[in-house]
Image: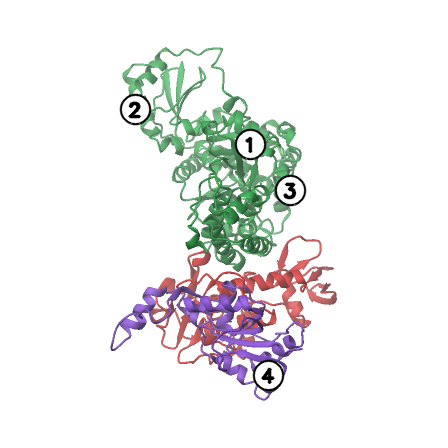
Amino acid sequence: MTTVFTFTIDGQAVAGSEDQTILEVAEENGIDIPTLCHLDGVKDRGACRLCVVEVAGSNKLAPACTTQIAEGMEITAHSDRLLEYRRAIIEMLFMERNHVCAVCVANNHCELQSMAEEHGLTHFDLPPISPVVGIDASHRLFAIDHNRCILCLRCVRVCDQIEGAHTWDVMQRGIETRVVTDMGKPWGESTTCTSCGKCVQVCPTGALFEKGRAVARGSKTRRPYLPYLKVVSEERG
Amino acid sequence: MSEMPAARPRPRPVTGHGGAAPEGPARVTASVCCAASCVSAQSDLILKKLGEKVAEAGLSDVAVKRVGCLGLCAAGPLIAIPETGRLLRGVTPDTLEPVVEELRSARPNGHKEAQEPFFSKQVRVATENMGTIDPEDIDDYQAHGGYEALRQVLTSMTPAEVRDEITRSGLRGRGGAGYGTGLKWTTVAKAQGSPKYVICNADEGDPGAFMDRSVLESDPYRVLEGMAIAAYAVEASEGYIYCRAEYPLAVARLRTAIRNAQRSGFLGSAIAETNFSFDIQVRLGAGAFVCGEETALIASIEGRRGTPRPRPPYPAVAGLWGKPTLINNVETYANVSSIVRNGAQWYSNIGAAGGKSKGTKVFALAGRVVNTGLVEVPMGMTLREIVYDIGGGIVDGRPFKAVQTGGPSGGCIPAEYLDMPVDYESLIKVGSFMGSGGMIIMDDTSCMVDVARYFMDFCREESCGKCPPCRVGTTELYRMLDKICSGEATMEDLEEMEKLAAIVQRTSLCGLGQGAPNPIFSTLRYFRDEYVAHIVDRVCPAGVCTIKPAEVAR
Amino acid sequence: MSKPTLATVWLDGCSGCHMSLLDTDERLLELTERADLVYSPIVDTKEFPEHVDVCLVEGAVSSEEDLHKIKMVRERTTTLIAFGDCAVTSNVPGMRNPIGVPPLFERAYIENATTNKQLPSSVVPRLLPTARPVHRVVKVDVFLPGCPPDADLIYNMLDDLLAGRVPNVAGARFGR
């Protein structure tokens, strides 16, 4: 038997079972908490910090995606302060690499772009970092443009946890962090990649895309299959 | 336990001595410091040569002994003659003749040389054997009270009694945050799940900090004993020491110590002939500062990328391999055996001036202080005593400007607080942090903006890259500080930097990002005029920063 | 009382934002009744007037000429609008920033040229080291991102400004 907890999010009374996270319960109740690294079906990592919420009685912000619910919690998911934080984080993500929406394959299909609009970001005050980062187009079907990568690691997790190939991983650290295929080999030479394309479908931006797509034509057309990921992962336990 | 193995003969421990052992009891001993700082100045060669020379000179009643850190690293290589209280400084392998002569004529004297404040003002608990015992010799450790505490715990105390004793002692985590050690042990003991693990965090990474390294190099058995007592108290049977690979000497001594402890029956199964079993493995870190964060450290031990994860759950509940795990740092464990031997009351009486902070704290004095080195002082001692009495004041008699404590998450404390007591709460009150014990002393030749930039550069390089506020925020903050240092910034830039710093502090995933803006906040709090001078007057008051010419800057 | 004055300036951009302004279609007539269009690539005036009430700036600040122009425009303008992604983020002109000017010139005028391989002479304004968004150079009052900004958004913003309201740019987004 599972225990049911009742608590509030932004003053709205909600209920969830003990093994649920704040984010899950919020979603079920139509409360939108922004996130870029969460993906139904793969393990949460609490990394993008967009889903941070305030929990009454705690002076630390809690990521909604990894925080388990508890009886009587009073959660603030939207406030002026949280909006300020979220805008700042979105801005940092834009400044980190070279996001040029106008010429991006994911233009108009990009979660980062939409996130900026939803949060009313009309410009950036932070200076851009403008790093020199490359593109790996060695794979037959797909390519990765690190200029657009926000390091949500959905690709890494879906490849490992759903496809079971673990082609993707992470190298270096700090601002130099990059996702890599086969410990840094070109994607086209990967012996583990099954070319399933899940990584491309789950990428929130134009970092991973199908070759041959023009600007703004990189919609993740097979996104609707994603709930299937959740079913798979639940079946696997 | 079904069967109690009978006391069995154990192989002799390894004691890879250099030096010379006297035939009978030694008249005098030359204790040669063989910790990293002196070894880097050839003290291992000194040990070998001195042993040969003493033998050549036929001084059969003189012992030449390898010991751990003698503390006064600035004056190394050091040789101590404990029987006379003499400390020979700056010895070189080519100037050993006077040393031999001194050893020839030295007589144990009742009135030892008056000790200078560097030594006399210290209270040594975690470092009590440091510079006295041979760090690899388990017999020497036992001859100085080693393993008495473990025996006592295993034969006459229940795990709960041990936890109570530690709780009553008031010992708090010496890794920096100052969480109550007894409370942590109790949480792990009560957590559901089996097996449980004990981890020693030896991933000391703060710039200018070398407390843990010195303890491991000088008295490794003390750490092993503390861990064994902790394991008994939380009912764990496996332990890990996570040590950075940049500490090769500490790692080598730890490995020797573990091997010797296993052979002497203080690690492994049936410890001290009881049914308690506990063993320890050393795991090396590749020098990532973030792996000092406990969840990143655990990930690294598990063989994964060393990145932190959000807490809760805390390691005490779900740590290594998802099991309840106790993590304390080296110095915390180093205090445990003394507390057990002398009692909680004894420990909490030390450092009574420290309020809620009890006992002692080891500090690594670095920077513009005369006596750079390792010191252990009672909690509540004033900064002035540490800097001027123990530290011997500022080099060249220059004016004291600030002391930086707490590493990259800490802050700079200005001269007006020289008379404040050093304890966890007081340091937080002035915007700094105890941290693991690095103390960098600065005089008027330090530019505080440059100092803030230095620490931000460190955090930027050490950020693991998992969360954007730390990964991007520290890079942006570093660039802003760099802009100020080169005289290119405006007051709006300063405002923007303060705003971003607050956001990085609030939204970062772990302590690295949350603490990274602290050097900015504390230098702004006490030295805002220096920031303004760089921006408005375009000068660096300390003359450190290179201000770009006006036509290039704007 | 005289009508408020309106100007538009074209720095380093593709003129797409101006096209989008023209896409306000018949509403342009209404706008020009409410304001005097005193300076723009689409009108004949050669000199930027001494004073302008509202100025739309398209494009990033890329060259010394852009720099000179935007400083002058700022001085003479009450409400300055960063108009479109190039003005707001430096966008496509900013794609050269990680590369640097000398390698960029080498690639464009030498490597990829089939005839007459030579670097631009003094006739063309010198490029600045980086193409910068307008607000990195002068103060900007209103940001309207988009590549290009939607005609409705442009109209609504100008409507608000001419009516003395705080402009509402909700719905504006980078790219598209």
Query: Mark 1 to mark 3: distance in Å?
Result: 18 Å
Tell me which amino acid carries mark 2. Answer: Lys
Mark 3: give few (<14), some (14-19) or many (20+) Cα within 10 Å.
some
Looking at the image, tell me whether mark 3 or mark 2 is earlier in sequence order.
2
Residues under numbered marks 4 and 2 in contact, where contact means CB atoms less than 8 Å apart? no
Looking at the image, tell me whether mark 1 or mark 2 is earlier in sequence order.
2
* Colour of chain A as rendered: red
Tell me which amino acid carries mark 4. Answer: Thr
* Colour of chain C as rendered: purple
Tell me which amino acid carries mark 3. Answer: Leu
Where residue B32 sits, quadrant-wise, is top left
- In-front residue for pair B182/B472: B472
Looking at the image, tell me whether mark 1 or mark 3 is earlier in sequence order.
3
Query: Mark 3 to mark 2: distance in Å?
Result: 50 Å
Q: Which residue is mark 3?
A: B183
Vertically, is A42 above or below B450?
Answer: below
Label 4 and label 3 in one chain:
no
Q: Which residue is mark 2?
A: B49
| Image coordinates for residue B157, horizontal then vertical, percent | 62, 34
Circle nearer the viewer, 4 or 3: 4
Query: Mark 1 to mark 4: distance in Å?
Result: 87 Å
Which chain is assigned green? Answer: B
Chain hosting mark 2: B
